[in-house]
Image (tube, rainbow, N blue to C red):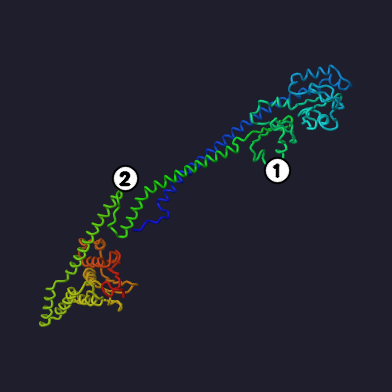
Amino acid sequence: MSRAPSGASFQRKLTWTFLIVGVIPLLICLLLLLNIFRLSLVRSDRSSAESQLSALEGSLSALLSSCDGVLSDLSGQRLVADAMAQEGKSTLVYNALYNTAAPYLKEADFSLYDASGALLYTTGRGDGGKPLPVNWGLLWAARQKGNTVFRAVSPYDAPTRGAMELCRAITLEGQTVGYAVARLSEDHLTQLFTGRYTSGSNVLLLDPFWDEVYSSPAIRETSLALQLRSQLLEGRSLGAGGEEAYSLLREERSGFLLILQRPRPMAGWVSRLFSLAATMSVLLCLTLSLAAALWFSRQLFRPIRSLNDAMAAVEEGDLEVRMEVTGTDELSQLSGRFNRMTQRLGENLEDSLLQQRELSAAQVRMMQAQLNPHFLYNTLDTLKWLGKIHDAPQVSTISADLAHILRQSISGGPFVPLSQELLLLEKYVEIQKIRFPGKFTYTIRAEEDLKQALVPRLMLQPLVENAIIHGFEDGSHGTVTVSVRRAGEDMVLTVTDDGCGMSPESRKRFLSRDPAASGHHLGLYNVDAILRLHYGPDRGLRLLSHPGDRGTCIQAILPIREEEGGEAL
């Protein structure tokens, strides 16, 4: 018993279906969940960073605005300007400095410098009397700008000078007589920023040139400002490829930059952990799906494969094949029904073959028996001799021809050479010419190399009889033509008349192939049935004429044989 091919088998398709259905949705869900989780963390982290930066910037902006207000107030007091224009110190100016800066003494240090850059008054510790240059740096910028300027303290001056300085020139009658300066030390900025960003994060304050002004204690020794500036110069984003994320906000009053450094919402080890968990989940699901697919497909495929093999055997003609029924499920029930079907099919096939053989033999005997009465032959032979004795030539001719026809019908097998069939046809036509004198003419055209081909006995006579009797029943005269020609490996026999033709009802009865409805065309039905029995259902008579056409054309196409069951000519 042949087996079904394994390529693209049902088992393989089922296995792949299980794998696809089991793994792909899981993989998609894992990817979606990971992305949703990551995006949620990133969004939450970004929102938190923006909130922290906003709080840091607000605090810094408020402090700078307050310091700017103090410096503006000091530079606008006439008492301070007059005292700065005179050399020496004044207790009144010192009091004015303290009174003006009193609300902000804990947030910044305020100082007054004279026109030469020497320190006169301060609320802080001072710097040991070290003057500030007036031709460059902070004092020069304040004198040139005319309002408050913001500068980062040079690292060479730290720690005595602080981290950030604000300065405003004090003028009297258009002349610069001194400078008011506010200093924010690292301690001041630490105090300002403390509690406004989360643990684990760090703050970095840069001037507009990306020089460090202040940094949280945890990153003070890391040169983070230089690293970030290098990344920007290289065209990369802040913190690209690192474990920390950065957010940036500019303080509008000073132009300084606040940068918040924080751990990334999903650190590298967390991403690796999630990837490992996702990979393990996919592998586990893949293993389970593969095991389930193999088990289920085997349980389902074994009976299906056996049934497929059994059906292939039945297709090849083996009706003895049976399926083994081992259970009560649907597939077992299907196997049982298959066994009963093949059993009944075998029984029906045997009955059908027996009935067909009996029917074929009976039909052939019946059709040939219509022209097989022995006593008619003996009687007609007697009539022939009586016609000659009594000088009645037509009676003698008819009797002789009819006797020849009857002799041919009762002698030999069911097939005869075409030449013998044509001779018998001539005898029949001769009788009909005597019966219907002048009613028709008869023409035969047969290729010589086909005259030894075998045809069923008495095949052409019913066709010619139908043409003579029914073709000219309206009293018309015409021609009956018999044509035999070769068409490849077949022989085409055609009987044509130019008579009145077949009525639509007669055509319908003939095409129905029903002998009970054949009426007067029983001869056509018999010939059609014999051809179908001997040569197959597609070798019956063909009616070539069309409704409304005059005349009738009947055609039969037979294989060319020189003897029954022999080779083609």
Q: Which residue is mark 2?
A: 329
Q: Nearer the viewer, residue 396 or 57?
A: 57
Q: Is residue 323 left or right of residue 380?
A: right
Residue 564 visible at all: yes
Label 1 vs 2, first from the N-terminus: 1
Q: Is residue 176 above or below residue 434?
A: above
Q: Which residue is mark 1?
A: 234
**Quadrant of residue 135 within the rendered picture:** top right
Residue type indicated by callout 2: Asp
Q: Between label 1 and label 2, give the one nearer the viewer.
A: 2
Residue type indicated by callout 1: Glu
Residue 505 visible at all: no
**Quadrant of residue 174 within the rendered picture:** top right
Q: Nearer the viewer, residue 479 or 262?
A: 262
Q: Residue furthest right?
A: 87
* Disc 1: CA contacts within 10 A as few (<14), some (14-19) or many (>=20): few
Q: Quadrant of the C terminus?
A: bottom left
Q: Is residue 82 above or below residue 449?
A: above
Q: Is residue 419 above or below residue 132?
A: below
Q: Nearer the viewer, residue 369 or 391?
A: 369
**Quadrant of residue 328 within the rendered picture:** top left
What is the tally of numbered marks visible in this picture? Answer: 2
- Horizontal and vertical percent position of residue 255: 73, 32
Q: Is residue 230 left or right of residue 176?
A: left
